[in-house]
Amino acid sequence: HKTHSPGFGVTISIDSDFGPATEMAVKKFQDYYDLDVTGVVDENTWEFLVGPMLVAFEGLEFGKDDNLQYRIVEIARQHLQEHPVELYSNRGPWVRAYMKGLDSSFNLTGDGQDWAQWCNGFTSTVLDHALASLGFDIQKVFPWTWSCYKSISQAKDSKFPNATWFSWDKIKESEFSIVQPGDLFLVMRNDHNPMHIGIVSNVKGSVIETVEGNTNDEGSAVGYEVCSNYRNLARRNYSIVKITL
């Protein structure tokens, strides 16, 4: 919580136990927010602890003419404003919020092709809320996934006609005009091996502005927060997933 409360600089180990160190941290947190200093996480303390997350997930008011792409960008930016961060490596309440209650970086199938990545969990969460705001079920349009591999395979699958995948060659061939705000971008190790995903929030020529999870200010694919970055599509292998209704 210290990201949202700069004056609150307490760090403790995660050991699944509410012990004396945790109690002291709770008391300091309560004192910082001028709450009753009891060391007990009561309802009032809990509201302050989860406040930034409640703001991030609060439903936005949209106009009837606001399309899916606009909604994707605005919801992503709403999360960005609350600066979600990990606690330790791929762990913490924000990660679990984007990963259906799970921590990240584990293999779901054992075949090496379905690694859980909270960058994809973040993207799926934003897309889920954007589609729901229009009355659509994500499972019928572009099923929720935490796998970059699965995002590409779904976009190529004829069962999901609302999604289209564009390779780097196609993007360059169009002189980057294919790419629009609200698209999903993927950082590729090669033509068939994705390593990171995020949301395009703005486009100027070959440069995209993004909102992405599991990254940092340097644009890492193994970072620890939700950030906005600038990426030059002409400089390395990217692909795009475009979802239309």
Image: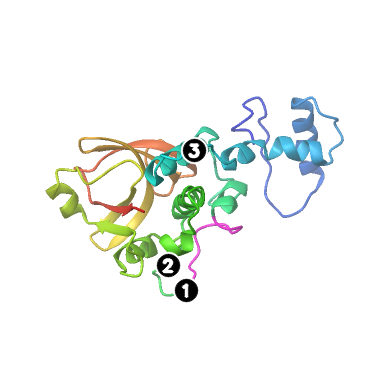
Vertical relation: 46 (above or below) 147: above
Amino acid tagged 2: Asp
Q: CA distance from mark 2 to mark 1?
A: 6 Å
Choose top left, top right, bottom left or bottom right for residue 45. top right
Amino acid tagged 1: Thr
Q: Is residue 144 visible?
A: no
Q: Residues within 10 Å of mark 2 (few under 14, many from 20)?
A: some
**Label 2: which residue?**
114
Magenta stretch encompasses residue 210: no
Q: Residues within 10 Å of mark 1 (few under 14, many from 20)?
A: few
**Label 1: which residue?**
109
- Residue 183: x and y in percent read 33, 47
- Which badge, 2 or 1, is on the more N-terminal residue? 1
**Label 3: which residue?**
62
Q: Residues within 10 Å of mark 3 (few under 14, many from 20)?
A: few
Residue placed most toward the observer, 169 or 177: 177
Q: Range of the magenta residues?
A: 99-109
- Residue 57: x and y in percent read 58, 43
